[in-house]
Image (cartoon, helix red, strand yellow):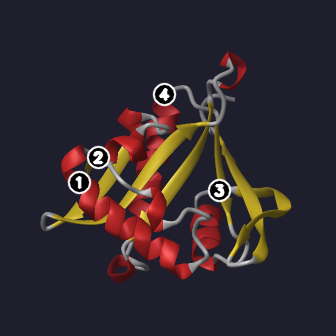
Amino acid sequence: MITLATPQDWEAIKAIYVEGMNTHNATFETPDNLSTYEQWIKNKIAEAAFVYRQDQEILGWAALYQVSGRCVYAGVVELSIYISEKARGKGVGSALMQHLIDYTESHNIWSIQAGMFPENKGSRALHTKFGFREVGIKEKIGKMNDQWRDVLYMERRSTTIF
């Protein structure tokens, strides 16, 4: 079952996020940057931050962010999606992705963007499965563990707005 994320979900959200961080292929963020739910949710669209529950256990989360405060970009968002290690490859990511897409199609959002490390084959495959296409690479955009990393950008355009 997919529900809105709440402050009570924070510890599970954080644990899943840290699992992703520990792969060194999910995000530049570090566990030091995670303190509270309020800090985590502040740059997200609060009504578009979701958790996937099975038997009361949170197995994944997904959220949308506005890419810009400028009105011309009101229909452009970026997504984050993280799945618990024990739930990867079991449809949780697909369920969350479909939920995000359904949300965007019903909220006049015409572009979903995603940035990922090119080495993250699971993320690339999930996004491709849902119609995202590669639109560019920012080369050596940031350092992780003293190594410059690239970020691949993928985009999905609305199928109902255009």
Residue flagged by tag 1: what amino acid is it?
Answer: Asp
Q: Nearer the viewer, mark 3 or mark 4?
A: 4
Q: Earlier in the sequence, mark 1 or mark 4?
A: 1
Find the distance from the CA under tag 2 to the CA under tag 1: 6 Å
Q: Earlier in the sequence, mark 3 or mark 4?
A: 4
Residue 93, compared with residue 106, is above or below; it is below
Label 2 residue SS: loop
**x%, y% of residue 54?**
20, 66
Label 3 residue SS: loop
Residue 157, compared with residue 147, is above or below; it is above
72 and 15: which one is in front? 15
Residue flagged by tag 2: what amino acid is it?
Answer: Ala
Find the distance from the CA under tag 2 to the CA under tag 3: 25 Å
Seen as rendered, the residue at the extreme left is 55
Q: Are marks 2 and 1 in contact (CB under 8 Å)?
A: yes
Identify the disc placed on residue 131: 3
Identify the disc placed on residue 9: 1
Q: Earlier in the sequence, mark 2 or mark 3?
A: 2
**Quadrant assignment, res 56:** bottom left
**x%, y% of residue 98?**
45, 53
Residue flagged by tag 4: what amino acid is it?
Answer: His
Identify the disc placed on residue 24: none
> Neighbour class for label 3 at 10 Å: few (<14), some, many (≥20)?
some
Q: Earlier in the sequence, mark 3 or mark 1?
A: 1
Residue topped by disc 4: 107
Residue at horizontal 69%, vertical 29%?
162
Residue topped by disc 2: 5
